[in-house]
């Protein structure tokens, strides 16, 4: 079978390559073999390959935080999956044509939808958006929130999930051509660039400010985002796109009781019971199936073209995600 490997950390499209590895041996009693159908390339995958992520796996290493596929073989004691089931891989190292895992590392995707590519992006970004929206501030319909990198995969999910629950979003992007697409999926306001946000947000919210700021950029953008918070508001940082430190004025923390905190999906999932994880992903599966959640896709590649796919995923100004279909004929 084909698999993506890295032998050294470095620029993703330089160090990652597609190679032949032996097919998995038959499954043990509690194991399942999955034909991997699709996986997205996320910023965290690129950072992991560069050796800059929170976890640095031992080398050589097969990347891949998320993927979906179809069950092809099950061990004798596995009764929760049958061949043909669509499943999401909860573990990592998924950029391969076939994965052999314990049944407990799989989550069955119960859906009538055949939108495989959207389900390939189920694990990371929709869950990140959903948990950030519900874990820090009790938001009511009509409340305002603000986010940066709003045209990202997470950004799309935040807009769509907030709109579903009546929460209003102010969305900061870097390009004017993102205004119409984001408005069309339910963004209440789209702002270009992160300068003088407080003044603009004051006008938009009628002086109320926002209760939650969702920050993937950090640096000066985080300072601008925090300046929009109402007293007692929370800024959640979940990304390091600028490579700069998070910024917030000390008097906002001291006198206005703002909170700066961080979100990492890995920690959240680790702290959730399995039935809570199943419930979360069942809700998100329904949202994808019904078209509530959908993230634009810019391109798909075969696994042989992993270097091109990685170079593409590393570009700025994309109009959507880059995915790989490892079992599609080249
Ligand atoms: N903490 C967690 O658990 C967690 C989970 C999921 C994602 N994330 C993080 O969330 C962020 C978005 O992930 P994604 O998969 O949704 O991204 P994505 O769909 O691949 O999109 C990348 C986004 O980053 C923006 N961007 C890139 N460099 C930037 C910079 N220097 N300043 C401002 N914006 C910049 C891009 O804007 P342009 O289109 O203008 O280039 C685009 O909006 C990443 O940082 C990722 O690591 C964190």
Image (cartoon, rainbow, N blue to C red):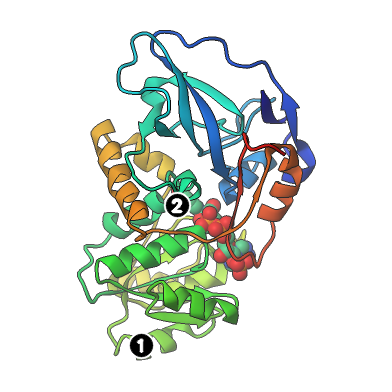
Q: Which residue is mark 2?
A: 125
Q: Tell me: residue 217, above or below residue 101.
A: below
Front in this rendered view, residue 278 or 243: 278
Residue drawn at 25 percent across, 38 percent down: 276
Residue 11 visible at all: no
Residue drawn at 58 percent across, 82 percent down: 176
| Residue 252 % position (x, y) | 37, 73
Say which mark, if any, is on residue 292. Answer: none
Q: Tell me: residue 74, above or below residue 314.
A: above
**The residue carrying mark 2 has its beta carbon less than 8 Å from ligand 1:** yes
Q: CA distance from mark 1 to mark 2?
A: 27 Å
Q: Viewed as shown, does residue 146 lie left or right of 6?
A: left
Q: Image quarter for residue 60?
A: top right
Q: Tell me: residue 312, above or below residue 95.
A: below
Residue 90 visible at all: yes
Q: Tell me: residue 28, above or below residue 14.
A: above
Front in this rendered view, residue 127 or 262: 127
Q: Image quarter for residue 192?
A: bottom right
| Residue 260 % position (x, y) | 39, 61
| Residue 185 % position (x, y) | 41, 71
| Ligand 1 sits in quadrant | bottom right
Say which mark, if any, is on residue 204. Answer: 1
Name the image quarter holding the N terminus.
top right
Q: Work out whether mark 1 precedes mark 2 in sequence or the reverse, and give the earlier one.
A: 2
Instruction: Check the image and name the residue furthest to the right.
Output: 14
Residue drawn at 75 percent across, 44 percent down: 307
Q: Viewed as shown, does residue 7 lie left or right of 111?
A: right
Tag 2: Cα neighbours inside 10 Å, few (<14), some, or many (≥20)?
Answer: many
Front in this rendered view, residue 81 or 41: 81
> Between tags 1 and 2, which lies in front?
2
């Amino acid at each position: 079978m084909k698999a993506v490997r890295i032998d050294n950390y470095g620029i993703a499209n330089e160090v990652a390559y597609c190679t032949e590895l032996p097919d998995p041996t038959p499954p043990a009693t509690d194991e399942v073999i999955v034909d991997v159908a699709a996986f997205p390339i996320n910023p965290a995958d690129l950072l992991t390959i560069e050796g800059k992520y929170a976890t640095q796996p031992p080398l050589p290493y097969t990347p891949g935080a998320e993927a979906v596929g179809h069950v092809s073989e099950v061990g004798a004691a596995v009764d929760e999956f049958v061949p043909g089931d669509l499943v999401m891989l909860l573990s990592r190292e998924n950029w391969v044509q076939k994965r052999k895992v314990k049944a407990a590392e799989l989550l069955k995707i119960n859906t009538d939808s055949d939108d495989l590519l959207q389900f390939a992006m189920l694990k990371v970004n929709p869950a990140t958006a959903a948990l950030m929206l519900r874990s820090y501030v009790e938001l009511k319909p009509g409340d305002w929130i603000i986010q940066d990198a709003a045209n990202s995969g997470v950004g799309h999910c935040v807009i769509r999930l907030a709109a579903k629950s009546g929460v209003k979003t102010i969305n900061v992007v870097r390009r004017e051509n993102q205004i119409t697409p984001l408005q069309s999926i339910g963004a209440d306001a789209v702002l270009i660039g992160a300068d003088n946000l407080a003044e603009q947000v004051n006008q938009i919210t009628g002086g109320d400010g926002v209760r939650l700021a969702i920050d993937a950029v950090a640096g000066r953008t985080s300072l601008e985002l925090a300046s929009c918070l109402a007293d007692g508001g929370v800024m959640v940082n979940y990304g390091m796109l600028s490579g700069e430190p998070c910024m917030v004025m000390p008097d906002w923390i001291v006198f206005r009781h703002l909170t700066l905190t961080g979100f990492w999906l890995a920690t959240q999932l680790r702290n959730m019971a399995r039935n809570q994880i199943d419930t979360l992903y069942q809700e998100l599966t329904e949202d994808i199936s019904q078209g509530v959640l959908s993230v634009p896709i810019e391109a798909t590649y075969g696994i042989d073209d992993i270097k091109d796919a990685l170079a593409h995923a590393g570009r700025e100004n994309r109009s959507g995600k880059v995915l790989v279909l490892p079992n599609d004929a080249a």
